[in-house]
Each structure stands twice: as C-alpha cells, then as structure tokens.
Amino acid sequence: MVGSHENELFHNRLTHTLEVAQVARRLAERLIVEEPELKSEIDPDVVETAALAHDIGHPPFGHIAEERLDQLATGARTIPGARMPVPAGFEGNAQSFRIVTSLARRSEKHHGLDLTRASLQALSKYPWPRSVAGYHHRKYGTYDVDESYFDWTREGIAASRRDEQTAEAFIMDWADDVTYALHDLDDFFRVGLIPLDRLTRSETEQSRFLERTFERLDEQGKPYGKEDYERTADLLFAELPLEPWVTATARGQMSNLVPSKINSYMTGLTRAENGQLQENPYMRREINLLKSLAWTYVIESPALAAQQHGQRTIIETLFDYYCDQAARSPHALPSWAQSYRSDEQRMAEHESPEAAYVRLASDIVASLSERQAFAIYSRVTGQTSGTVLGSILR
C-alpha cells in the first residue's frame, strides 16, 4: 500500500481497510454456515468492526515510520533536550488499540470509542504487551500505559489462552494478509516494480527471491519447511504472468488471478478437531510468498533508499518538534492532544511527565496523513511559511 498522493492508481490504506472488512465479514459468514458450532464464537459485525479499525494506528510512510518511531520512543537515537525513554516504544497495532480505547473520544465523559470487549479482542492481532526480546518484543498489541484497558479485554479468557487470538481476531488477521498480499502484487506489477514476468521465466531470479525470503523468515525467527516452500513456489510461479503488464495478455491474467485467489483463500480457514480455527498450510505458505514479493522488490529496493531516508528525516523532525511543544508550548499541539495533556489523571498514568511527552509526540506523529506530515515538516524546517488561515491540524 502507498500514500494517496501517488500519481498512479494504487490501493491505499483506506481502500485496503474497506477490502479487509469485506473479506473478513464474508469469511465469518461462510464459517458460521459451514460450521454451526462456531456461531457462539463468531459475530460478523464484530469481525467487520475489528477489520475497519485494524490499521488506524499505523503512521505515515508505513513500516519505515513505525520502525523509526519505535527507535525514537525507546531512546535508541540520541536527541536534544530532556527525554525519558519509553520502553514500550511504538507499534502500529498497539497504537490502533490505544486510539480506540484511549485517544478517540465518543463523548465528553468517556475516553475511546466505547467498543465492546469482543470487538477489542478481535482487534488484537498480537494479544500481549511488549516483552524484552524475541517475537513478542517486535510485535505486540498494547503499551504499558494502556494496560488496564487491555486487561479488561482479556477477562473471561482462560489463562492458558490469554495470549492467543480469539476466533474473530484470527479471521480478521487472515483477511488482512490475503488482501495486503494480493493488492500489493497487483499494484506493484502494474507499475513495473515487481517483475513477475522475469520471475516466472528465470530460475536464477526465482532462486534469488527464495533465498531472500528464507533469510527474512530466519531473521523473524519463524519456523518453516524449506522444501515445502520451494514446492509451493513452483506451483505459484506457474500461475503468474509470463509477460510484462503492458501486454493485454498479462493484464487479463492479473484481472483473473486476484479475484480467483481471494475466492480460494476464503476457504483457507477451517475448524480443527479441538474446535479452534486453523489455516490451510499450503495457502499460508502461498500468502507468505506473495507478501515476500513486495518486501523483496519494493520495500527493500535500493531505488527507494533515498525516499526512505527522507521519510525517516521527516519523522525524526516531527517527533523532536512535538516532544518540545508538549513540554514547553502545549498551545502548539492539536486540540485533542492539548486536551490529553491537560488531563492530570491521564498524565499521571505515565512514569514521568517526560515519558508522557514522548508518548504524546508519538501519538501526534502517528495520527498524521502523509500530506500533513510533509506540510508540517515544510513549516517546521522553514521550507515554506504557509498562511495563518492554512491550518494543517486542528
């Protein structure tokens, strides 16, 4: 997914969210029909609600900004002024949970959107706080400052399954992966960034792609069977276009491939003998390979290095700016952030005022659209003065 400012017609975070909600709801409805025993565990409205909210915590510029905000919040980079590192750092899924439970306002009397416990459980793809190392350090679903909200959502779940996804979260997570993998494939093949035609024709290119995929799986500490992935890749490559996007043949193949894959993956979840949902292992490998295409050819592309460096610079500058404003000039903050800062009870939940300012700066930066981030950066750095009536944030 890319920003809405791009000239090409890409899927963006909004269209992705709507598509995840559609896929997740239909999948929930299918499972209830095919497995009536799941009716007590699955509510399509709950699944759709979680899907609509699952990405709202992700910052501008996506993974690059998420990584940099985490480094900044945890103090991994030396920055001027007094800063109190926040060990919980920044994570997009934890930020989504924070928004719907704490930052958003449904009424003057209540913080958050007053969602049901089931909806908040379904939103939790990673239902645990941050740990000191390992996978639970990289991916997690709540910050320590939001622990009371999170603990409330896990009430009623057996202790042995407290850090497992609910059935509704499992469905939402699968729908997210399906939609993300296929629409990134479609978008980036169309603009020539993912060379499917070269990949399907060249064994050398296939080997290079698989080698990088296995390296990434090793880095993530995820178990996998190399031979299983190689067999899955052979079958997947045989379905991909042999010609570049500019040909009518390739365009026709892609227009059929994406919807047919979505239909296929709608059958990818089934009820296991123990009553829990399980993924089709072949489809899981195939989806992981599709996701790896975007990582290998787009996200890790040397051609994007300069753009990513600029995006990191924007995030760092805005983070520093809002940390300073939170501490010294709160009137310069967005109105919702001013309200948060003036709430003595909520500020007292943090380890210190300095830690609260770091968290608030992360909240503000993560709330920006890419257009807003560019515009504020230009003003903060003096590249443009703007006008008194040209308010960017309110």
Image (cartoon, helix red, strand yellow):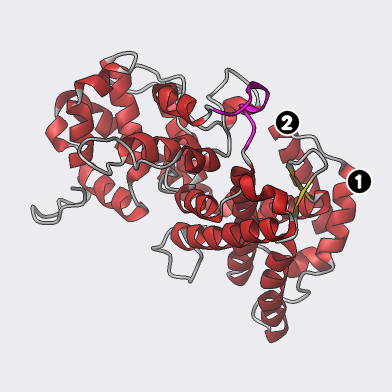
Q: In the image, 32: left or right of 285? A: left
State the residue position of label 2: 221
Q: Residues within 10 Å of mark 2 (few under 14, many from 20)?
A: few
Along the line of sight, the residue nearer the viewer: 282 or 170: 170
Predominant secondary structure, magenta span:
loop
Does residue 263 sit above or below 205 in this rendering? below
Residue at (25%, 47%) from the top-left corner?
Answer: 376
State the residue position of label 1: 227
Along the line of sight, the residue nearer the viewer: 342 or 22: 22
| Marks 1/2: CA–CA distance | 17 Å
Q: Position of residue 253 (x, y in %)?
A: 72, 78
Q: Total marks drawn?
A: 2
- Can residue 337 be seen in the rendering of this structure? yes
Query: Which portion, as a residue range, is magenta?
Result: 156-165
Does residue 263 sit above or below 53 in this rendering? below
Q: Residue extending furthest bottom?
A: 248
Q: Position of residue 154 (x, y in %)?
A: 53, 29
Task: Quadrant for residue 19, please give it.
Answer: bottom right
Task: Quadrant for residue 26, please give it.
Answer: bottom right
